[in-house]
Amino acid sequence: MVKPFMPQLVYFEPKALEYPLGQQLFKQFTDMGKEIRYTTSHNQVRNLPGENDFQRYRIAKSTLVVGIRKTLKFDTSKPSAEYAIPFATGCMGHCHYCYLQTTMGSKPYIRTYVNVDEILEAAQNYMDERSPEITRFEASCTSDIVGVDHLTHTLKRAIEYFGQSDLGRLRFVTKFSHVDHLLNAKHNGRTRFRFSMNADYVIKYFEPGTSRLADRIEAAAKVAHAGYPLGFIIAPIYLFEGWKEGYKELFERLSHDLPDDAKGDITFELIQHRFTKPAKKVIQKNYPMTKLELDEEKRRYKWGKYGIGKYIYPKEEESEMKETLFEYIHTYFPEGKIEYFT
Ligand code: SF4
């Protein structure tokens, strides 16, 4: 079992200590004897230890920076929500294909923001603006928020905040099974708790540092028992030898282990594996031994925004993948809702 994240090194923005959560985290890490350093801004943590990029990348992924979120203008987050709500940035996982490798570039450390009240206030303003429409917030656009939440309980606060809100909905996705502290949160059915799931093979070879399949399924069952609406993101769907069997087993296990009453309101989001040229470079630098197939010749090029296209599966393979997974979902979760395949 992958243990809950514990940083090796912690940085604080001095201003973070003016907030109750900043003070609490400072005490927590001091009591544990963690090395604490200071930084003027979470955007510029300099002098991370490590002799080369490879080492620095790994050390950064076990470094936590406690700071203040200054930009309270939220990004949009279509199609799954109206806005991205920023509680944290970065992730301790080592998924070879993680999009954060390219979007975070030189800042792979994990940042948590302690001005939670201000972030929630900004969310309230967005909700008021759209009233009487419902406004959905996605909490995992720039991090795997559950992975760090056992330390901060920020997500738990947000779940309870939205639990009280008539016009706001919260959603997030995780590859971590450390959910126990979230089970008794007063969510009122207004948070959709999603797990990122994959065939055992994919998790085993490409998602080091995250919870294993059996642990994620067990956590999903606990979350379902706690009454949360549940969702699964199957991503990235990756064609390996025996993929049909591998994905079938995934749905069989999910269906077997989840309580029946959770299966009525369950969503699926399906995303095939893709890569861009810049991402391929970063992946090969950060994970030089990866078995991940990144051969442009075996893929189809799809034009993208800003002239950076992505390589997805050729039409025929894509159709086969889509048909196969749709069939599994219809078989094992006849009431499940497939939100999209991309
Ligand atoms: Fe990236 Fe998600 Fe893996 Fe974290 S768990 S490294 S955010 S893909």
Image: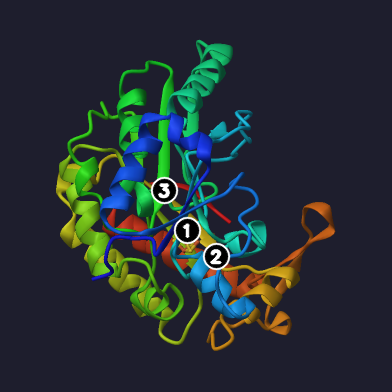
- For the residues carrying marks 2 and 1, which lies nearer the camera in this image? 1
State yes or no: Cβ of the residue under disc 2 lies below 8 Å from any atom of ligand 1: yes
Question: Residue type at mark 2?
Answer: Cys
At label 1, the amino acid type is: Cys
What is the crowding at mark 1: few (fewer than 14 residues within 10 Å), some, or many (at least 20)? many
Which residue, given by chain and number where applicable, does mark 1 sit on? 91
Is residue 334 visible in the rendered image? The answer is no
Considering depth in this image, is 7 or 33 the residue closer to the camera?
33
Which residue sits at x=37%, y=51%? 148
Q: Quadrant of the N terminus?
A: bottom left
Mark 3 surroundings: few (<14), some (14-19) or many (≥20) residues within 10 A: many
- Amino acid on which disc 3 is placed: Ile
Instruction: Residue 6 in the image: state x and y as whole percent.
Output: 33, 60
* Residue 323 against residue 142 in the figure, above or below: below
Work out which quarter of the rendered image holds the C terminus and state it.
bottom right
Across and down, in percent, residue 250 comes to: 31, 68
Asked which colour scheme the image uses, the reply is rainbow
Position of 14 compared to 230: left or right?
right
On residue 145, the disc is 3
